[in-house]
Structure formats: C-alpha cells, structure tokens
Image (tube, rainbow, N blue to C red):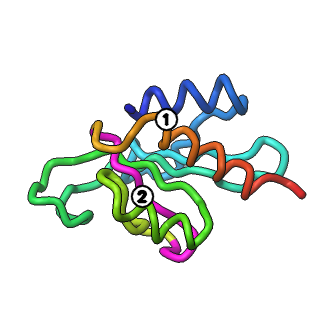
Amino acid sequence: MTKEEIIAYAANTYQSKPEYLWERDPQSAVLRHTDNGKWYAALLHVSGKKLGLPTDAQVDILNVKCDPDTIALMTAEPGFSMAWHMNKKHWITILLNGMADDTVTLRMLDRSYEITKKR
C-alpha cells in the first residue's frame, strides 16, 4: 500500500484530505476528522534509520491509533512497529513499503478513525 493509496482511500471513505502541517517536512501530512478535528492518521516521510532499518533512505510510514492489545500483537508482524514519534501505548507505525498486508493496513486505518471519532 502506498501513501497515495491511503490518501485516496481516506478521501473516498471519510472525505478527509491530507493536511501538510510542517514547512520543514512538506511530504508528511495528517488525516483528521472533519467534525472534531482529531487526527486519526499521520503519513510521515522519515529516514529508515529512525525506524531501526539498515538504511538512511527515506521511507513512508502510516501512524494510526489503536488499542494497546492490538499494538502488542501487530508489532510481531512484518511491516508493523512501535509508533515513531507518537505515543507508543496508543499508536502504531505501519511501513508503506509493501511489507504490511494492505487489507490489514486499511482495517487499522478504519479502526483508528472509529477510535478518534466524536462520541
């Protein structure tokens, strides 16, 4: 799954558009609810070294919110890791390099949307 596919899915499913908040990092964005403004995903462009990968090359990642039990299970799967630059108890990082299963990635994005929606 690519960053562009995530953005298209969010636009079609949740009518969300990416917000590019960081001048120093114009390739990274957040997806937020249109009603309450809460983030449900962050699409980040970071050095592989920051994720423990054996490369300095930039990689795209998706951070989504999920429950702690899911984080414990999913970080054992290829393409998933503890959240980079987010609360590690409630967020998880998904590498957008083809390692993580696309169906699981979208299911986790959907769950993050549900967790963060207005109650």
> Quarter holding the C terminus?
bottom right
Q: Earlier in the sequence, mark 1 or mark 2?
A: 2
- The residue positioned 28% from the left and 43% from the top of the image is 99
Q: Which residue bears the numbered disc 1?
A: 103
Q: Examine the rendered structure and indicate whether residue 10 appears above or below residue 76.
A: above
Measured in 3D between alpha carbons, the distance from the residue under mark 1 to the one under mark 2, in whole angstroms, is: 15 Å
Of circles 1 and 2, the one toward us is: 1
> Quarter holding the N terminus?
top left
Q: Examine the rendered structure and indicate whether residue 54 appears above or below residue 28.
A: below
Please rate how many residues cluster around mark 2, counting C-alpha atoms within 10 Å: few if below 14, some from 14 to 19, many from 20: many
- Image coordinates of residue 29 in percent, x first then y, are 50, 45
- Residue type at mark 2 is Thr
- The residue positioned 64% from the left and 43% from the top of the image is 110
- Is residue 89 highlighted in magenta? yes
Q: Does residue 94 appear to the left or right of 90 in the view shown?
A: left
Q: Does residue 84 appear to the left or right of 17 in the view shown?
A: left
- Image coordinates of residue 117 in percent, x first then y, are 79, 52
- Is residue 6 highlighted in magenta? no
Q: Which residue bears the numbered disc 2?
A: 93
Q: Give the quadrant of residue 51.
A: bottom left
Please rate how many residues cluster around mark 1, counting C-alpha atoms within 10 Å: few if below 14, some from 14 to 19, many from 20: few
- Image coordinates of residue 37 in percent, x first then y, are 76, 52
Task: Give the tally of numbered discs.
Answer: 2
Could you tell me which secondary element the residue under label 1 belongs to?
helix
For the record, the magenta segment spans 87-97
User: Which disc number belongs to residue 88?
Assistant: none
- Residue type at mark 1 is Thr
- Image coordinates of residue 12 in percent, x first then y, are 66, 23
Q: Give the quadrant of residue 109.
A: top right
- The residue positioned 32% from the left and 51% from the top of the image is 79
